[in-house]
Image (cartoon, helix red, strand yellow):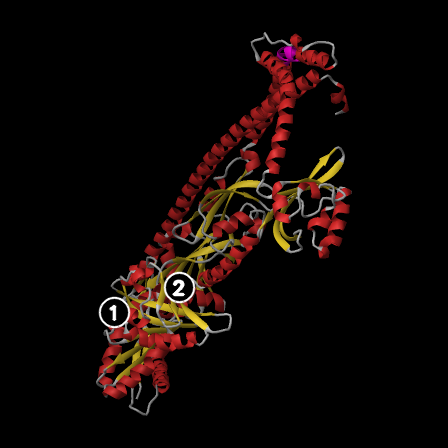
Amino acid sequence: MAATARLPIAAQLKFRMTAVVILLVLVATMTVTWVALVLAEQDMKAIIGDQQYALLSSSAAQLDADLGSKMALLASLAENLPGSDSAEAMLAYMGRHAVVRREFRNLHLYQPQRHLLHTVGSGTSKFDISIEAQQYLRRVLDAGKATVSPPYYSVQAGSPAVMVLQPVFDASGRAIMLLGGSIDLHNSPMLQHVARQKSGQTGHTFLMTSSGDAVHHPERALLMKNLGQQGSSQAAVQRALAGFQGWTEVVNTDGSAAIYSFKRLQRVDWILGASYPVKEAFAPMIAMRRQGMLAAAVFAVVAGLMGWIAIWLMLRPLNLLRQHISAIREGGASIDVLQRGRRDEIGELSVAFHRLMAEREAAQAAIRDSEALISNILQRAPDAFVSCSADGVITKWNTAAERTFGWSSSEAMGRDIAELIVPPAMRTAHSAGMRAFAEGHIGGLIDARVRIAAVHRDGHEVPVELSLGSVRHAGEYYATAFLRDITERLRYEKQLAASEKRVRMIADNLPVLIAYLDHERKFQFANATFQHWFGMAPAQLIGCPLIDAIGAAHNAVAAPWLERAYGGQNATYELKTTVQGALRTLETTFVPELAEDGQVIGIYALSHDTTRLKQIEERLTELARTDSLTGIANRLRFEEILPRAVLRARRNRKPLALAYLDIDYFKAVNDGHGHGAGDAVLCEFAARLTAQVRAMDTVARIAGDEFVIIFEQVNDSGEAARLAAKIVAAMRTPFDVAGQRLHLSTSLGVALHEGDSETAEELLARADAALYQAKRQGRDGYAVSD
């Protein structure tokens, strides 16, 4: 900066302009280059991601096809499997199907007798299995569907494996055993094909379950471990486990970025993933980015040098003009030396400077005239104008000041302002303020507008609005003040304050409908809402008694609340009435207006339409009594309806039956198919119940898979049994859940109300006991309480 300051002005300007040119060119070039490269990288990234996802989708389809082929082979083998469970019979049968045998590492036959028949080479063996494995195989057998087991560590193979399980059915179509074929996930040809489908030199593919357990991975240490909690790709894996499919870019836990693609398999709940490091994928683009930035910098430097030459040529006339102005300032030349004949910006600048010098004297003369005009304006100003020096001596006192304070200009000039107009109680503070003002401390009153009291010549106080300013002249401070007599304004403000109080009370309690009643209960004000709502013009209501306007019925409702309001208390009540042809709910508030002595002189009536709020309250009440999953009544509504139904049965002498039921083995649905499938079953179950009952009956879900039905007007226990049998039969139709057909059933207990002596709680307890009796009888049936 010091070196730049020593340069001539023209040189400094040329240097700065050149620097600006270099900077602008550099920024523009590098920005364009950077944006172009970033856009190219984004396009390239999309192409790489789409290609990687397409390759992964092809591999996933191949895996689905391979698994489908193996499941089809196993199904064909199971169709003709011998009924005998002897090792010799199984070995002979496997020998006749060598093609199937080669597709699996081992073949297994599971029967519910807690052992597993296992083929080993050319022989067989039996061995016991764990309780957990037996429970899983039993669930698969009960489901009666072919499935692929979760990955497990195979002791025989020494690596992760899965087993394809195919039910074997007897002549009646009942699954009696499972035929299983194990697949070595590490050495299987179908997974070797997946391992070869990788991107670049450092990319890789991997296979995991929907819970994140690694089924196939190039790092064997990660096999059978949760990839969402292991390895560097945890963030990407967690997105895939949450349901993401496609490709995305993720920063790994080791700080490296990679493009990940994920595809879910159709036949088994597995996810196929692929990783391609960004560093390898974009190596050419990174090199291109460095070269582009270097080229932009070189281009900016060249442009700067060219700019320097061009600027130097353009600024030569400006440098000459600077020399002429310096000569004029030093008295060595007249203004005639200026280059007024040039037809460019320099010539225009010379002409402007010439005019400026010529107009200088004229401006000084105009200033003198302006000062005289300002003095006359201040003298004739409508407000009092007073100025004084820093010691409080008055230097200006206009005609309005003479009228306001009673002192003539000749009497006031040269006097201390405190002696003339400052009240005695304020003179000490005034003197301290003037001392601070003389020392250059501008107080809070300067450039502010305040109200103060001043003293008239005859001694009475005059309320004034003071606008105080300060002027510095010849090294001294002068105070200037405009003072406006606000005596009349204060009188009007007091009246306005009383009126504003009334308006503020209305505004603070403002609903929609507004009226004012005097102490005789007659309208003195009504807003336009009366016309819109009731067809009554506000002008016609003025002076009208309240009862004539609202009618005797409405007046009877409002009377007690009016009495409270005229007693000095706020009162609020609701009324249903017809507004614009529709029944609406209005909330009205009475606010009393009190006189200074505390007497009520009138009532403000404020009304607003609360119909919508009432509807919302009723809707919320309805939602609180409805089961959010199935849409039928919940426990709260059931507990409200049952006692009323019992009372109706007693009053009408019509019997009442209560059914208590649940879904057999519902926990197995949640465990085997997920809670989403369980929710779908509950919704379908509730829909079937609703379809099987009469309009007068009530169906409710009271907890989990527990439901109740209130059958009204049931003649006897025989009719109750027929209704129960109808419900049980309706549940035997298979449930279609997410493309799967589930065979479910229900157990139901029903109790008939025994008469006036039995409470609703006792009736519910008997129905619950009947339900457990139905379960003890083998489920998929009903029991009627004795």
Mark 2 element type = helix
Q: Residue at x 52, y 49 (%)?
A: 237
Q: Is residue 417 magenta?
A: no
Q: What residue is pinned by disc 2?
A: 140
Vertical placement of residue 487 versus 679, above or below: above
Vertical placement of residue 478 versus 235, above or below: above
How packed is label 2: few (under 14 Cα within 10 Å), some, or many (20 or more)?
many
Q: Nearest the camera: 30 or 307?
A: 307
Q: Residue 325 in the image: state x and y as whole percent.
A: 69, 14
Q: Residue 228 in the image: state x and y as whole percent.
A: 54, 52
Q: Nearest the camera: 54 or 567?
A: 567
Precedes in sequence: disc 2 or disc 1: 2
Q: Nearest the camera: 589 or 717?
A: 589
Helix, strand or loop: magenta stretch = helix
Vertical placement of residue 637 versus 80, above or below: below
Q: Residue 468 in the image: state x and y as whole percent.
A: 65, 44
**Any part of residue 434 in sight:** yes
* Residue type at numbered disc 1: Ala
Mark 1 element type = helix
Q: Residue at x 43, y 54 (%)?
A: 269
Q: What residue is pinned by disc 1?
A: 691
Q: Residue 301 in the image: state x and y as whole percent.
A: 64, 19
Range drawn in magenta: 309-318
Q: CA distance from mark 2 to mark 1?
A: 32 Å
Quadrant assignment for the C terminus: bottom left
How packed is label 1: few (under 14 Cα within 10 Å), some, or many (20 or more)?
few
